[in-house]
Image: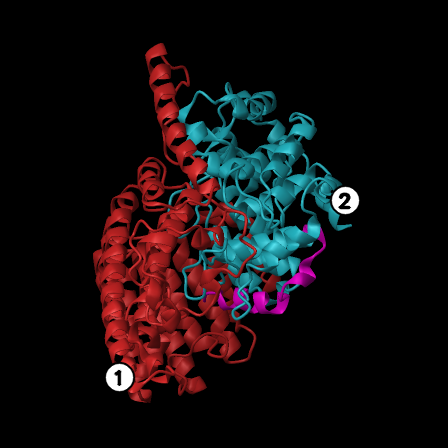
């Protein structure tokens, strides 16, 4: 299975022979680690998810953030102790709303015993499940006298406010706990997913405005992590997830497509070769244009601007695959608008042909400056084929001659992919 | 192919016996701190090691009875498997458990001494998101196309694919496709070779390769080969032996393996061997591990390196096993 955790990446090979001293040091570390492990297991096996267990998970996770079972134990500790009762404002939970952090009851923890995972996964339900808690709205239906109902409402409101304060504080402490671990292990799936679980808890337990505040800070984290590694796909995925949630009704959000598009601008300016940013741009553009209510002229201007930008980039870095992939994205919009999100749906075939031939001409000029970059010849080949397809015709003799020449250059410059060039030759019948 | 492999210099011949010894010794390193730090991958590690040994033609190099005992000792009441005794059940370790039991032909022991196939299938099926069709890794809800593939892999081996909504899962995979022909972790995510493997393999198991843009994907995958012969996982990234599997198996599934230079890739993988102590690393000269060892060997097997048993490009298991189990 595809899981990179625990595998060695980029660590120089050394002799495995250790001195006696080194070996002893390892044995000491192992003893300490296993002792922590034994303590956690002994307690959780009995269904105990107490503050003591919680503290042990902190120690263990700092030593080994890949230990997913310990992250799960930590979640169970939060659920059965640290957090307020799941539905703090609902009528049945008022009595227990003063539960202290140490009051882990056997009843609440048995439902999370380690082998009961056949129960409905919490995250499978809607993100807002269990949220009834904080607004105390069900109280109006309580079958009590007006007077006691009013008093009850006050009590419930106070309890709900206290519960929210406590949950917010727990969540913030937890989010802070994962930061140093994430900085040390930025590709550890388990830390990222624990963090997302905490954020989901924020939606479930806090009022939307308060939960929103928690989520908003995550954009800063995503930026920070991407500042350290511009291609970290965990951080990009996290960012997309955070943005989608911030846009959702659960957090009373609205579209963030403009600032996110601006973010890709910023990342591309820092590093033209950052395909992750170009990719993100390709996904945002269709929405961006729709939400701007862009008319045909605005869409044409937008495409012009994107083409201009990528052409300038190609002029300085024609061997950069990232740039060519983005150029392909723009060209696919012209030649296969049915299969790819159309930026310019109003374009006539003449428009498409005009744009495509201009790109082909521009690329031919690139050859003048760079005659040994295979990606240029590949683009010429591909786009010329598209041109003929757009015009629903076979290549003319001059075009065919071009295809033959470019294929020859591809073979010469890129023999690694000779099998592909041979297939192209067969497919377009270019053998003389 | 095999002709040219035989002409490789001595130091680039496969160090079969060193690799076998290396894998056999993995469970005897209990005085090393890393052994304990990686316990959350124990069952996966057993699958990697066992598969590597089968590909090396040494299927009996690990004791079968102990292997089965260990696998069954990781199973929970729910049917799911944890990475080791005392570890929570998870999709990743459950898939490894099923793969191991399939490889050593022990589904019958799962019935008699374990919780049974049906329970395992139910555990996996319960992790499907019935709204979107994708799968979670466990009850805590992380979703990823890795888990979707894992579910399809294990359920098809168990003959229980009908427990899940295959069409919905297929639609989800299709929604993960990008303009470049590749696939990401979830809809909207950047194409990534590991994720491409999981998505194309899932579609292959579902009999829906028609949804793959093979031309475009093949082009993207073939561009992963960079100077030196190794493959990277995304544009403008470094090469790594593990992509010898993710990229190459994907190319194989769509019939485009000939779009890269096989000899150069084989030489790259062989340069990553530790010829004395065994094992394969991510790049030449780095520390070896069983993960890169199995994916390096599986890559060599797909390249038809002489002496290696054929690997199934969809399951990353010996072809003899998938032929027996899937019929």
Label 1 resides on the chain identified as A
Q: Is residue B222 left or right of residue A31?
A: right
The foreground one among A187 and A383 is A187
Label 2 resides on the chain identified as B
Q: Is residue B276 left or right of residue B59?
A: left
Magenta stretch: helix, strand or loop mostly: helix
The colour one sees for chain A in the rendered image is red
Choose top left, top right, bottom left or bottom right for residue B114.
Answer: top right
Residue occupied by mark 2: B324
CA separation, marks 1 and 2?
75 Å
The x, y position of residue B327, in whole percent, is: 78, 50
Which chain's colour is cyan?
B
The foreground one among B206 and B249 is B206
Question: Dot 1: within a 10 Å radius of its alpha carbon, few (fewer than 14), some, or many (20 or more) residues?
Answer: few
The x, y position of residue A65, in whole percent, is: 36, 41
Residue extent of the magenta highlight: B157-179
Any mark on residue A147, and which? 1
Q: Is there one chain holding both mark 1 and mark 2?
A: no
Which numbered mark, 1 or 2, is in the foreground of this view? Answer: 1
Quarter of the N terminus of chain B within the rendering = top right
| A132 is higher (above) or lower (below) than A202 | below
């Amino acid at each position: 299975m595809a899981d990179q955790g625990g595998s060695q990446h980029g660590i120089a090979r050394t002799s495995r022979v250790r001195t006696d001293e080194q070996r002893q040091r390892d044995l000491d570390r192992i003893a300490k680690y296993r002792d922590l492990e034994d303590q956690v297991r002994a307690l959780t096996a009995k269904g105990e998810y107490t503050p003591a267990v919680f503290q042990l998970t902190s120690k263990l996770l700092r030593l080994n953030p890949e230990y997913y079972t310990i992250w799960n134990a930590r979640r169970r500790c939060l659920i059965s102790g640290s957090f307020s009762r799941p539905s703090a404002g609902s009528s049945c939970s008022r009595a227990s709303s003063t539960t202290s952090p140490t009051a882990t009851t056997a009843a609440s923890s048995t439902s999370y015993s380690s082998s009961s995972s056949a129960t409905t996964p919490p995250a499978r339900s809607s993100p807002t499940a269990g949220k009834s808690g904080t607004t105390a709205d069900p109280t109006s239906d309580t079958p009590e006298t007006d007077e006691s109902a009013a008093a009850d409402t006050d009590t419930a409101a106070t309890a709900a406010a206290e519960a929210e304060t406590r949950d917010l504080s727990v969540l913030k402490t937890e989010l802070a706990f994962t930061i140093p671990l994430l900085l040390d292990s930025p590709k550890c799936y388990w830390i990222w997913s624990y963090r997302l679980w905490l954020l989901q808890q924020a939606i479930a337990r806090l009022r939307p405005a308060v939960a929103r505040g928690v989520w908003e800070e995550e954009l800063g984290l995503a930026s920070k992590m991407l500042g350290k590694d511009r291609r970290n796909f965990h951080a990009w995925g996290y960012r997309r997830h955070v943005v989608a949630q911030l846009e959702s009704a659960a957090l009373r959000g609205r579209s963030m497509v403009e600032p996110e598009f601006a973010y890709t601008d910023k990342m591309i300016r820092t590093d033209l070769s950052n395909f992750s940013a170009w990719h993100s741009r390709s996904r945002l553009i269709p929405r961006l244009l729709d939400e701007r209510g862009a008319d045909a002229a605005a869409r044409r201007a937008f495409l012009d601007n994107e083409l201009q930008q990528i052409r300038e980039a190609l002029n300085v870095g024609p061997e950069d695959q990232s740039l060519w992939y983005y150029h392909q994205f723009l060209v696919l919009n012209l030649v296969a608008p049915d299969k790819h999100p159309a930026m310019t749906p109003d374009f006539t075939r003449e428009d498409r042909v005009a744009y495509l031939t201009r790109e082909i001409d521009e690329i031919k000029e690139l050859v003048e400056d760079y005659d040994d970059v295979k990606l240029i010849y590949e683009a010429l080949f591909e786009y010329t084929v598209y041109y003929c397809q757009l015009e629903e015709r076979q290549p003319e003799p001059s075009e065919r001659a071009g295809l033959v020449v470019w294929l020859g250059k591809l073979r010469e410059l890129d023999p690694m992919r000779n099998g592909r060039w041979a297939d192209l030759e067969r497919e377009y019948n270019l053998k003389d | 192919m095999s002709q040219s492999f035989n002409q490789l210099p001595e130091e680039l011949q496969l160090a079969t016996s060193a690799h076998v010894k290396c894998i056999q010794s993995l469970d005897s390193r209990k005085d090393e701190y890393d052994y304990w730090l990686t316990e959350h991958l124990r069952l996966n590690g057993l699958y990697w090691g066992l598969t590597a040994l089968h590909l090396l033609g040494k299927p009996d190099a690990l004791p079968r009875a102990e292997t089965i005992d260990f696998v069954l000792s990781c199973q929970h009441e729910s049917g799911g498997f944890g990475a080791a005794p005392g570890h929570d059940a998870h999709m990743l370790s459950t898939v490894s458990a099923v793969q191991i039991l399939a490889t050593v032909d022990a589904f019958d022991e799962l019935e008699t001494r374990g919780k049974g196939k049906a329970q395992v299938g139910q555990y996996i099926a319960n992790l499907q998101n019935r709204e979107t069709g994708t799968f979670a890794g466990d009850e805590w809800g992380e979703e990823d196309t890795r888990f979707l593939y894992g579910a399809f892999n294990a359920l098809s081996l168990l003959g229980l694919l009908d427990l899940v909504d295959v069409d919905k899962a297929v639609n989800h995979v299709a929604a993960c496709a990008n303009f470049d022909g590749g696939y990401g972790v979830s809809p909207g995510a950047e194409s990534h070779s590991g994720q491409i493997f999981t998505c194309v393999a899932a579609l292959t198991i579902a009999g829906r390769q028609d949804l793959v843009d093979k031309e475009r994907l093949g082009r993207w995958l073939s561009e992963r080969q960079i100077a030196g012969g190794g493959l990277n996982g995304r544009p403008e990234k470094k090469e790594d032996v593990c992509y010898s599997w993710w990229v190459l198996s994907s190319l194989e599934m769509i019939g485009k393996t000939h779009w890269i230079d096989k000899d150069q890739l084989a030489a790259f993988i062989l340069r990553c061997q530790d010829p004395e102590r065994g094992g394969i690393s991510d790049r030449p000269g780095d520390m070896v591990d069983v993960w890169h060892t199995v994916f390096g060997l599986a890559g060599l097997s797909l390249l038809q390196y002489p002496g290696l048993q054929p690997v199934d490009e969809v399951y990353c298991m010996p072809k003899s096993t998938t032929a027996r189990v899937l019929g």
